């Protein structure tokens, strides 16, 4: 719609000291540019954006996110810019009169349908590609069964780590600090609520596949730096893969991401990424310790084992009514 | 309850006088009174849900637990959502619909006035049940407002209460939606064709169909 000035200029006299917002469109453009510059190289440590992360998948997710984000910014600038400009420049107090002659235009409607379709396709292609990549768990080099419990995780290694099996629970100092009336300041606890007694250990540069399930309610395993999050559902086995870039060894922390009861916020996920050699050494240590514990148990039948679980390869489903298949 | 009115020996049909007092509200059949009741109800529910949100905010103000048991915190989160969605947002929209739709399409009232009233009066009962679950052993629903099993089924008394309450609210919404569709489709004033109808009525028409399709999923 075009607004035209009335033939007689009814413009009201401007009061002293005010002026029409001439520089306004430039202010908006500059603001957008400054924002763009800051986030272009951005990193994520300010906590506002997605982490770029240490896996191929997480980096693809970050790139896709920024792409879609800038498309949205572009659309917003055009739409809000046109709107604000029209609202201000053609306001009634300046004498603008609405144009009532243009009621319908098929050409315009076709254009403003086709352009959004193109934009959607441009967004959908990389998104679909990334989803397919996420689902492709073929040729995994290490598989680990991850079972969610209320309120801890159990990790059972397969392949080269077969036999390593342990629970991963919130660390004692965090657990103590978080109790009501504990008197301990959470700020004094390092990695408060993000630390466990036995973290998941994996090798870098290796395609790791997690087989997620649960023994009781729905949980979700999530490590933001890996771009990895998937539900752990009783009666189902969900697959999740990631490959931490070589050279990115270290400790990565995440949390349970599906409400699972009273201590949902107190069952974190901690992953210790080591070089493949260090990982092999660690597996040997674990197996050795398991053998010792098994031997000790054989000698003392009443003793409970706290290290190993069942070494069978089959996934044990909970014998409850809510197994759907 | 005998009114002394003149002379009408044929029958005591006093429908020419509007009801007063509690009967006006309990037996309302006009869209304005019912709309007002919905809006007042949704305002009260907004404050209750808001209070629960304040408990959440107070606890989350600083790291660590200061005020509430984690189980109770989950109850507040779940109840805040249930109360806000089913008690503040949906009834306020229905109240606005009751007020605006007959006026905007030129109808004398909604199509089914008594069912309209019934739809409203289900809600205070449903919310009494839901809010009462805060006071029963085991506490209020704490399994999330999406009520996913198996977590939700780990609850005790609240499971039955929450499901029953949500079923009642669903019935109220479905009947309200039926009312809206019939009013808009059948009772528009002459000359008010669908393409002349205000956008508010259009959005309610579509919402009403969606409600009828979807409400069973929430209840079943």
Image: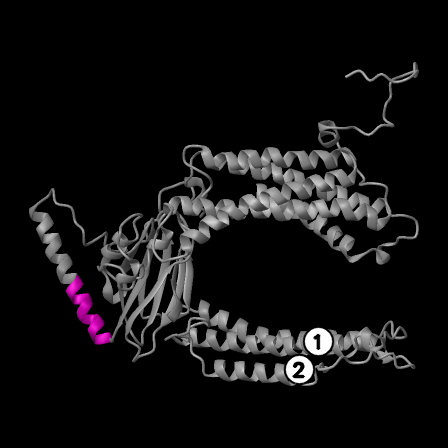
Q: Is residue A234 rendered magenta in the image?
A: no
Residue furthest out toward the left = A299
Q: Is residue A220 above or below residue A93?
A: above
Looking at the picture, how far across and down is residue A266, in whole percent?
Answer: 33, 54
Q: Which residues are magenta?
A: A276-286
Where residue B164 is drawn, which disc sits there?
Answer: none
Q: Quadrant of the C terminus of chain B?
A: top right
Q: Which residue: 54% across, 71% down?
A: A128
Q: Secondary structure under badge 2?
A: helix
- Residue B42 vs residue A14: left or right? left
State the image coordinates of residue B214 (x, y, percent, origin top left): 64, 48
Q: Magenta stretch: residue A277 in it?
A: yes
Chain of residue at mark 2: A
The residue positioned 45% from the left and 34% from the top of the image is B135
Mark 2, residue position: A24
Same-chain check, marks 1 and 2: yes
Q: Secondary structure at mark 1?
A: helix
Q: Residue at x 79, y 48 (%)?
A: B101
- Chain for numbered disc 1: A
In this picture, is B8 found above or below A245? Answer: above
Residue A203 location in percent, x, y?
Answer: 27, 72
**Given this view, does label 1 or label 2 mark the residue nearer the observer?**
2
CB under 8 Å between callouts 1 and 2? yes
Write the residue at 20% across / 66% down.
Answer: A283
Q: Check disc 1 and report the residue beneath it.
A: A84
């Amino acid at each position: 719609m075009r607004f035209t000035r009335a033939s007689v200029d009814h413009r009201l006299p401007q009061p002293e000291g005010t002026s029409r917002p001439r520089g306004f469109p430039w202010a908006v453009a500059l603001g957008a540019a400054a924002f763009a510059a800051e986030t272009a190289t951005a990193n994520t440590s300010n906590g506002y954006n997605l982490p770029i992360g240490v896996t191929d998948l997480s980096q693809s997710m970050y790139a896709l996110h920024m792409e879609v984000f800038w498309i949205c910014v572009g659309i917003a600038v055009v739409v809000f810019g046109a709107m604000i400009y029209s609202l201000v420049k053609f306001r009634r107090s300046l004498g603008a009169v609405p144009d009532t002659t243009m009621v319908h235009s098929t050409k315009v409607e076709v254009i403003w349908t086709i352009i959004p379709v193109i934009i959607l396709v441009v967004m959908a292609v990389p998104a679909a590609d990334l989803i397919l990549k996420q689902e492709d768990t073929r040729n995994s080099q290490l598989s680990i069964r991850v079972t969610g419990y209320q309120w801890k995780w159990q990790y059972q290694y397969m392949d080269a780590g077969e036999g390593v099996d342990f629970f991963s629970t919130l660390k004692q100092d965090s657990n103590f600090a978080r109790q009501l009336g504990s008197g301990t300041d959470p700020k004094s606890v390092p990695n408060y609520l993000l630390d466990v007694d036995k973290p998941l250990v994996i090798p870098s540069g290796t395609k790791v596949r997690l087989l997620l399930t649960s023994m009781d309610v729905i949980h979700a395993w999530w490590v933001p730096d890996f771009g990895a999050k998937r539900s752990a559902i009783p009666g189902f086995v969900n697959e999740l893969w990631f490959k931490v870039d070589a050279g990115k060894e270290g400790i990565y922390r995440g949390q349970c991401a599906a409400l699972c009861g009273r201590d949902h916020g107190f069952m974190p996920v901690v992953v210790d990424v080591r070089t493949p050699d260090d990982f092999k050494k660690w597996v040997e240590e674990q197996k050795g310790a398991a053998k010792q514990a098994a031997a000790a148990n054989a000698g003392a039948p009443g003793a409970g084992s706290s290290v190993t679980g069942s070494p069978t390869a089959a996934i044990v489903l909970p014998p409850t009514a809510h197994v759907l298949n | 309850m005998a009114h002394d009115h003149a002379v009408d020996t044929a029958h005591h049909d006093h429908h020419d006088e509007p009801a007063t007092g509690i009967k006006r509200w309990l037996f309302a059949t006009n869209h304005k009174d019912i709309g007002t009741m919905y809006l007042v109800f949704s305002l009260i529910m907004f404050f209750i849900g808001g209070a629960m949100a304040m408990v959440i905010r107070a606890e989350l103000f600083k790291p660590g637990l200061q005020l509430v048991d984690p189980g109770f915190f989950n109850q507040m989160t779940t109840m805040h959502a249930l109360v806000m969605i089913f008690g503040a947002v949906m009834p306020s929209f229905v109240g606005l619909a009751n007020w605006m739709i007959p006026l905007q399409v030129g109808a004398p009232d909604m199509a089914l006035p008594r069912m309209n009233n019934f739809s409203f009066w289900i809600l205070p009962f449903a919310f009494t049940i839901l809010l009462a679950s805060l006071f029963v052993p085991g506490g209020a629903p704490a399994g999330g407002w999406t009520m996913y099993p198996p977590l939700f089924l780990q609850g005790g008394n609240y499971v039955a209460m929450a499901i029953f309450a949500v079923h009642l609210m669903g019935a109220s919404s479905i009947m309200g939606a039926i009312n809206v569709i019939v009013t808009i489709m059948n009772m528009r004033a002459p000359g008010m064709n669908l393409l002349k109808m205000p956008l508010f009525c259009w959005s309610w028409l579509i919402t009403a169909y969606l409600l009828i399709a979807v409400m069973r999923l929430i209840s079943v």
